[in-house]
Amino acid sequence: MSEPENPTPQQQVTTEVVVDDSATVPSYSNFCRVTATPEEVILDFGLNPQPFAQGRQDVKAIQRLVMNFYTAKRLLTALGMTIQRHEGTFGSIELDVRRRAQVPQQAQTSPGPKGVVE
């Protein structure tokens, strides 16, 4: 019997995903509700016209995405990496609106006329 031939190294196969977004309708959302079933993650997106109002707020969901947990975990990873890059470039994203609304101490005590550009 003859010996088997030396196996050739597997060629690296690359996959390219091309997304056709020509029919995509963009929308803005400042509200997201996440719910789940044992099989799926459900994301409801909407617009809250008064996000800082007190009491009951009715928000109409305008878009619902349903995905399996594998896709949800890939989305979590992609969003985490995107936010990490953004914060690395522009600084930390403060989620507490009270902290965001505070005027920095330096801006409160800066001497000189306002509106002057040097």
Image: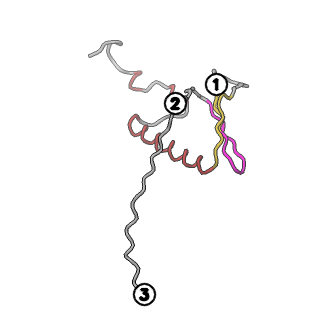
Q: Earlier in the sequence, mark 1 or mark 3?
A: 3
Q: Give the magenta range.
A: 31-42
Q: Earlier in the sequence, mark 3 or mark 2?
A: 3
Give the mark toward the camera: 1 or 3. Answer: 3
- Residue 14 as seen in the image, left or right of residue 22: left
| Residue 65 against residue 69 in the figure, above or below | above
Q: Which mark is residue 48?
A: 1
Q: CA distance from mark 3 to mark 2?
A: 79 Å
Decide which of 6, 88 is in the foreground and name it.
6
Give the mark toward the camera: 3 or 2. Answer: 3
Callout 3 crowding tier (Cα within 10 Å): few <14, some 14–19, many ≥20: few
Please name the residue that numbered disc 2 is placed on: 99
* Quarter of the picture holding the N terminus: bottom left
As shown in the figure, which amino acid type bears the numbered disc 3?
Answer: Met
| Residue 35 against residue 3 in the figure, above or below | above
User: Is 118 colored magenta in this rendering?
Assistant: no
Circle 3: element type: loop
- Residue 64 as seen in the image, left or right of residue 83: right
Please name the residue that numbered disc 3 is placed on: 1
**Residue found at the far front of this picture:** 1
Q: Earlier in the sequence, mark 1 or mark 2?
A: 1
Q: CA distance from mark 1 to mark 3?
A: 76 Å
- Residue 46 as seen in the image, left or right of residue 117: right
Residue 84: horizontal and vertical position, in percent?
Answer: 45, 42
Circle 1: element type: loop
| Residue 104 against residue 1 in the figure, above or below | above
